[in-house]
Image (cartoon, coloured by chain):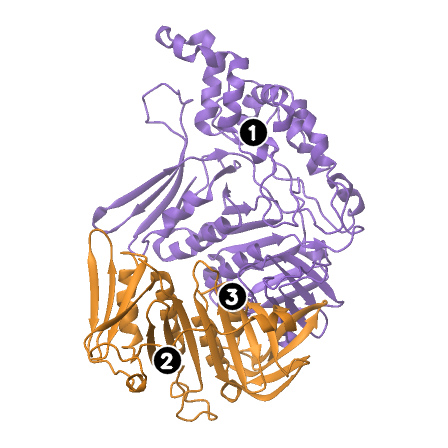
Chain colours: A purple, B orange
């Protein structure tokens, strides 16, 4: 993948990254032939963002070597955003590219000419260059399965106007409620169900009533009250405001997510210019008011909601040994790695996610099987699934689980690979140093801490608000 | 217990709340038929107390108050909350109403703000500041600190000058010594093991009524000194928010340093209700520390 961001659009690109960075800790990158998608979601899976840059946005864009391959990876948001934060006014040219090692990287080899990195190269005047080489992790991306055509209500409003509602809220507010009727909109920083503490230091309660005539478009047929997390909504507003693009919302009822879209303003006349701007879509979970709206388990939702929701088969890389997608995307949860047949391990670990998966299946099998239960081994899966939402809970965002086992960075993958092959072809001088790694039992405890993020091992990610549940 | 009024000068109210912002988390609002008082009593470690009073006509119109305790109401509120609520009144509010009410069974000071959107349509905004009502017994316990007669009263130099030097002195030590004499000199001194810094202000105006008192025991160039917490001194300097007309510094040796900050009316040209006289004051009591 190689993309050249025009200097004039660098700010736009930065705003997109910044928005994703304020939603979650990671940014997923999906490079397709016609577009570059940046995807983010928060730790509790209650917010999801996807910003699509068309190929025309870039001065030069090349998705990859072959036409049908899609490159997917994730990087740490903080690092990537940080690159563009510092002084980018003087940048003349900015190139993002993925460097892939031509051969598995050896942990002990001093040769650094082939590494897997996301390279960001900024060119300044007087031939000054700034180059950042970031670790990335090849993994699957997430896509929302909610369709705005299923939503009964929608509106579109100028971003500055929407931002002025939230500006009145106290800094400590965690949630907001949108109460929308055919004739009025009430924006509240508090929810009717929340228990008020008898304390003078409680937070400020703000209620704002707005005339729907202030909206560019307002279509609500029946009263709806949505409660959502303020943090992510603020991030969306900030992005929309800086892009000076209108904010469109699509919603149905409490417990169903609020779909937001920030698209280029329609009044830009030049058609090609409009195409070159990114479009962003956001899915924000809302609180279900009573238990009947909240599903008891993920797996029941596709059946009951089948008429109104389309569950697209996720983009899938066509490889011979890859498992066929099930009807339910949740079948591909973490523990189902164990069901996969071990593939051919002689493949390069560093190519597409699919081949990486194939090569790593056996390794991951043993990792998952040998993990202690508390760390998310096979036995912990029922515990996760049986988590029944209480009366007020955020509805899950239905997103397909990643197929490839994430959590392996490129260098560590190759480390693993080398370790497995070590007994056969290790050079004589290296036997001593690498021998412990060839033994699976010795390798485990270190492996856990090294190459698996908390999330993927089943540790509960920190909830952003007290009432939010971990959704997977 | 009823309280309801129109707020005509929300800007002044905001400035007063801004100036007490750093003092404490919560403050007490005392509402009486003629005046509004804001009282901040910080914890015993700091010892700073702020008593302020503003005449109602400078802030409100259409003022209604009713209660069983001589028509006085005491409520405790969170300073941040009220400040945030009042900030919403800035930028083209058409009308602001303040009232005491109950929402969800809890007492709140409700600020109802009417304004207009960019499209010219009405927006109504309601900011509910949660409060705690004080009982008659609790009200009786709150009283202004009793300090002996001050030995000297002097007009403070412009607050911005003092502020800029105090900000620098803050890093040197946590005690500041303020010395004043009858010639109109004021020395602000801070010291530690390595450095001793004194700022001299000359030609300040001493107030004449000191000399009428019995306790003229020192010559005109002899200093009266009070040592107070640097932190408290800087907190007092926050009162620049109200654009004070003049500030009187009173030294009560071995007891306290008292500052009377008079809120001028000239800074608020938009309030017709005010005349040239000060419409209120903030009184800071800074207890003296032994070095």
Task: Please state the horizontal and vertical placement of residue A24, each as a whole percent of the image.
Answer: 53, 46
Q: Which sits earlier in the primary sequence, circle 3 or circle 2? A: 3
Image position of A436 (left or right of A247): left
Q: CA distance from mark 3 to mark 2?
A: 22 Å
Residue matched to label 1: A354
| Relative depth, front residue between B21 and A287 | B21
Judged from the image, the secondary structure of the residue bearing numbered disc 1 is: helix
| Residue under label 2 | B244
- Is residue B111 visible in the rendered image? The answer is no
What kind of element bears circle 2?
strand
What is the C-alpha distance between the residues marked 3 and 1? 54 Å
- Locate residue A204 relative to residue B46 in the image: left or right: right
- The answer to whether B227 is drawn above or below residue B12 in the figure is above
Classify residue A323 by image quadrant. Answer: top right
- Nearer the observer: mark 3 or 1; the answer is 3
- Frontmost of labels 3 and 2 is 2
The residue nearer to you, when weighing A176 against B166, is: B166
Q: Where does the image place residue B36, in percent across and percent down from the top left?
A: 53, 81
Please state the chain letter of the residue tagged with numbered disc 1 in the rendered image: A
> Dividing the image into 4 quarters, which one contains the N terminus of chain A?
top left
| Mark 3 chain | B
- Image quadrant holding the C terminus of chain A, namely top right
Location of residue B214 (image quadrant) = bottom left
Q: Tell if the residue under mark 1 belongs to the same chain as the one under mark 2.
A: no
Residue that label 3 marks:
B80
Q: Indicate whether A335 appears above or below B18.
A: above
């Amino acid at each position: 993948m190689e993309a050249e961001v025009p200097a004039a659009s660098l700010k736009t690109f930065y705003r997109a990254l910044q928005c994703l960075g304020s939603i979650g800790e990671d940014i997923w990158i999906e490079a397709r032939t016609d577009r570059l998608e940046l995807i983010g979601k928060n730790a509790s899976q209650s917010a999801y963002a996807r910003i699509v840059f068309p190929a025309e946005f870039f001065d030069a864009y090349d998705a990859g070597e072959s036409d049908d391959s899609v490159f997917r990876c994730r990087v740490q948001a903080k690092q990537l955003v940080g690159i563009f934060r510092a002084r980018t006014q003087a940048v003349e040219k900015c190139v993002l590219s993925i460097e892939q090692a031509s051969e598995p990287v050896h942990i002990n080899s001093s040769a650094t000419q082939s590494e897997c990195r996301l390279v960001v190269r900024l060119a300044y005047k007087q031939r000054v260059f700034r180059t950042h080489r970031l670790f990335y992790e090849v993994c699957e991306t997430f896509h929302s399965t909610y369709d705005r055509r299923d939503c009964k209500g929608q509106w579109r409003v100028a971003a500055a106007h929407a931002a002025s509602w939230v500006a009145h809220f106290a800094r400590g507010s965690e949630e907001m409620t949108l109460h929308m009727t055919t004739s009025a909109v009430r924006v509240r920083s508090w929810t009717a169900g929340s228990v008020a503490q008898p304390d003078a230091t409680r937070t400020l309660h703000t209620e704002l009533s707005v005339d729907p005539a202030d909206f560019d478009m307002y279509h609500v047929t029946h009263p709806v009250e949505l409660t959502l997390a303020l943090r992510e909504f603020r991030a969306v507003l900030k992005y929309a405001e800086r892009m000076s693009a209108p904010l469109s919302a699509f919603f149905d009822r409490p417990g169903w997510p609020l779909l937001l879209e920030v698209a280029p303003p329609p009044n830009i006349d030049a058609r090609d210019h409009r195409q070159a701007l990114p479009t962003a879509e956001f899915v924000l979970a809302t609180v279900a008011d009573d238990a009947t709206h909240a599903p008891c388990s993920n797996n029941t939702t596709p059946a009951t909601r089948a008429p109104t929701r389309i569950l697209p088969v996720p983009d899938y890389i066509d490889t011979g040994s890859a498992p066929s997608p099930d009807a339910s995307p949740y079948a591909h949860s973490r523990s189902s790695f164990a069901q996969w047949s071990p593939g051919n391990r002689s493949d390069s670990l560093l190519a597409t996610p699919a081949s990486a998966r194939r090569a790593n299946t056996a390794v991951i099998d043993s990792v998952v099987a040998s993990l202690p239960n508390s760390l998310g081994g096979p036995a912990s899966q029922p515990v996760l699934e049986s988590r029944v939402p209480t009366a007020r809970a955020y509805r899950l965002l239905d997103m397909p689980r990643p197929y490839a086992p994430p959590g392996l960075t490129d260098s560590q993958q190759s480390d693993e690979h080398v370790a497995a092959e070590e007994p056969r072809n290790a050079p004589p001088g290296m036997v001593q140093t690498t021998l412990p790694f060839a033994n699976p039992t010795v390798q485990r405890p270190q492996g856990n801490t090294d190459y698996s993020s908390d999330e993927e091992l089943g540790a509960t990610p920190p909830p952003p608000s007290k009432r939010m549940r971990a959704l997977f | 217990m009823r309280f309801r009024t129109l707020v005509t000068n929300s800007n002044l109210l905001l400035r007063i709340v801004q100036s007490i912002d750093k003092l404490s988390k919560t403050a007490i609002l005392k509402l009486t038929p003629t005046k509004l008082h804001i009282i901040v009593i910080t914890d015993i470690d700091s010892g700073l107390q702020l008593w302020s009073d503003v005449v109602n006509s400078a802030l409100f119109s259409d003022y209604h108050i009713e209660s069983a305790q001589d028509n006085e109401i005491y409520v405790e509120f969170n300073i941040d909350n009220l400040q945030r609520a009042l900030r919403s009144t800035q930028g083209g509010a058409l009308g602001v109403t303040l009232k005491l009410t109950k929402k969800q069974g809890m007492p709140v000071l409700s600020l109802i703000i009417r304004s207009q959107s960019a499209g010219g349509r009405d927006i109504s905004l309601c900011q509910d500041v949660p409060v705690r009502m004080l009982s008659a017994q609790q009200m009786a316990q709150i009283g202004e600190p009793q300090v002996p007669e001050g030995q000297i009263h002097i007009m403070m130099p412009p607050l911005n000058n003092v502020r800029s030097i105090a900000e620098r002195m803050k890093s040197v030590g946590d005690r500041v010594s303020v010395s004043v004499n009858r010639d109109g000199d004021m020395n602000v001194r801070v010291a530690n093991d390595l450095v001793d810094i004194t700022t001299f202000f000359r030609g300040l105006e001493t107030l004449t009524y000191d000399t009428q008192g019995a306790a003229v025991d020192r010559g005109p160039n002899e200093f009266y000194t009070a040592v107070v917490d640097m932190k408290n001194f800087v907190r007092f300097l926050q009162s620049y928010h109200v654009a004070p007309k003049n500030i009187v510094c009173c030294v009560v040796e071995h007891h306290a340093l008292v500052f009377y900050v008079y809120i001028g009316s000239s800074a608020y040209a938009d309030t017709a209700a005010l005349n040239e006289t000060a419409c209120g004051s903030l009184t800071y009591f800074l207890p003296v520390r032994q070095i």
